Image (cartoon, rainbow, N blue to C red):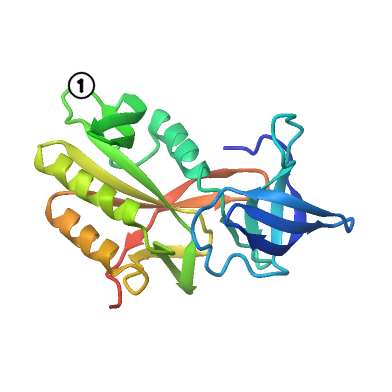
């Protein structure tokens, strides 16, 4: 999935109010960018970090830049836009590029499936059980090669796991897809020390039949695309 406009490099001055980031462009100008990430962004919002911004000329938008990437300056990148994974996964599902889900021919986004929840994607295909797919963006890494979720307490995520467990128990496929927006990780685990309730809910959902898929990404300042399957490992408690 290519970025709509060419990204420009900058240095992070500070992130604040969760959705705002002051940045310094290469020409010295200071700008405020929209940060589409409600999480803690642990390890990704340190002043001085090299980042990439996407400019826009939309008159309806107050901020003329959106923060898209962290450049680790060692050949690796992290995507910080939490709206991007659903778009990337949708494109991959429609192109039938995700192992384990490629047999499905119909992809419906944002389908209501209980009294007050919507599933990211409902997949259907002839002769196949419906597959309910929830996508989570993973950006935290505190050990080399190991991605972790979540990066902060997520009651909403825990609720999603309970709903997926009910789907699995009703006879449908329930799939939790962790899309790792980092190019420096090949394993995924639960951050049990950050949110033990989420980790317990994940264990319970797995016992109820919820499937977990972990997928990496290829990231450059030009595009983000779906990568290879990653290994899920048990957390260190």
The answer to whether 18 appears left or right of 110 in the picture is right
Secondary structure state at the residue bearing disc 1: loop
Instruction: Examine the rendered structure and indicate whether residue 98 appears above or below residue 13.
Output: above
Q: Residues within 10 Å of mark 1 (few under 14, many from 20)?
A: few
Residue in the image at 62% along x and 37% along y:
2
Q: Quadrant of residue 152?
A: bottom left
The answer to whether 176 appears left or right of 93 in the picture is left
Q: Measured from the top left, where is residue 120 in percent x and y? A: 36, 37
Q: Nearer the viewer, residue 142 or 219?
A: 142
Instruction: Examine the rendered structure and indicate whether residue 25 appears above or below residue 114.
Output: below
Residue in the image at 24% along x and 35% along y:
131
Residue position marked by numbered label 1 in the rendering? 126
Residue in the image at 24% along x and 32% along y:
113
- Extreme right residue here? 27
Q: Measured from the top left, where is residue 127 in percent x and y? A: 16, 24
Q: Is residue 206 visible?
A: yes
- Extreme bottom residue here? 237
The quadrant the N terminus occupies is top right
Q: Measured from the top left, where is residue 98 in percent x and y? A: 37, 40
Residue in the image at 22% along x and 49% along y:
211
The quadrant the C terminus occupies is bottom left
Q: Is residue 103 visible?
A: no
- Extreme left residue here? 170
């Amino acid at each position: 999935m290519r970025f709509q406009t060419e990204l420009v490099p900058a240095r992070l001055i500070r992130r604040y109010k969760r959705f705002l980031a002051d940045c310094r462009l290469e020409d010295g100008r200071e700008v405020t960018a929209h940060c589409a990430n409600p999480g803690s962004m642990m390890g990704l919002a340190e002043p001085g970090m090299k980042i990439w911004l996407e400019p826009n000329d939309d008159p309806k938008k107050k901020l003329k830049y959106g923060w898209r990437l962290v450049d680790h300056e060692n050949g690796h990148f992290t995507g910080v836009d939490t709206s991007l994974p659903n778009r990337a996964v949708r494109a991959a599902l429609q192109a039938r590029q995700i192992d384990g889900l490629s047999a499905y021919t119909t992809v419906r986004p944002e389908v209501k499936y209980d009294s007050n929840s919507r599933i990211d994607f409902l997949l259907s295909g002839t002769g196949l059980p419906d597959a309910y797919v929830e996508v989570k963006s993973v950006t935290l890494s505190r050990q080399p090669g190991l991605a972790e979720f979540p990066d902060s307490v997520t009651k909403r995520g825990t609720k999603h796991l309970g709903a997926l467990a009910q789907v699995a128990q009703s006879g449908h496929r329930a799939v939790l897809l962790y899309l790792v927006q980092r190019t420096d990780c090949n394993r995924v685990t639960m951050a049990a020390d950050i949110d033990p309730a989420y980790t317990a809910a994940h264990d319970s959902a797995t016992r109820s039949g919820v499937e977990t898929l972990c997928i990496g990404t290829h990231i450059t300042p030009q595009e983000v695309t779906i990568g290879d399957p990653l290994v899920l490992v048990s957390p260190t408690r």
